[in-house]
Amino acid sequence: MPRTVLVLLLVMAGISLLRALLPPHLDYQFIVWFALYLFVNGEFVWERLYSLVTSVFIHEGLVHLLFNGFWIATIGTLVQRTLNSRDFLILFLGSAVAGGVLFVALNWG
């Protein structure tokens, strides 16, 4: 497995472990800060655009993490073999942003 893919998986697993160790009120605050919430009280909040990237690292439970991790390891390894690390990360994060934008467009408000 390429180093870039492994690092992404370790970051995701580390964030999931951190969330599991946090008290419930701090885990809730973590979600509020980093999950894909672009609307507050029905209004678009431009300052939260960073969550288009941060939300890709948050998983809701072990099954979600393992499922996404399996596909990132499988497909990410194949893609990484044709791209350099920088281009792979650009593709990965660009895909995260595109997915978040599509989700927001389909669930506007």
Image: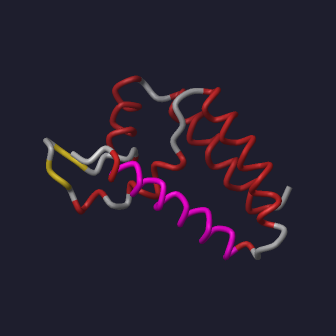
- Give the left or right position of residue 52, taking residue 56 as reference: left
Image quadrant containing the C terminus = top left
In this view, 8 is above or below 69: below
Magenta span contains residue 84? no
Magenta span contains residue 91? yes
- Give the left or right position of residue 97, taking residue 92 as reference: left
Quarter-wise, where is residue 24 in the image? Answer: top left
- Give the left or right position of residue 96, taking residue 35 as reference: right
Residue at the (43%, 53%) spot, across then down: 100
**Nearest the camera: 105 or 41?**
105
Give the residue at the far front of this rendering: 106
Q: Position of residue 32 (x, y in %)?
A: 32, 40
Q: Position of residue 87 (x, y in %)?
A: 67, 75
Total labels drawn: 0
**What main secondary structure does the magenta stretch of the protein show?**
helix
In this view, 102 is above or below 61: below
**Nearest the camera: 106 or 84?**
106
Residue at the (71%, 56%) spot, across then down: 7
**Nearest the camera: 45 or 103?**
103
Q: Position of residue 92 (x, y in %)?
A: 61, 62
- Give the left or right position of residue 81, taking residue 107 as reference: right
In this view, 96 is above or below 64: below
Image quadrant containing the N terminus = bottom right
Q: Position of residue 98 (x, y in %)?
A: 47, 61
Magenta residues, start to end: 86-104
Give the residue at the far top of this rendering: 24
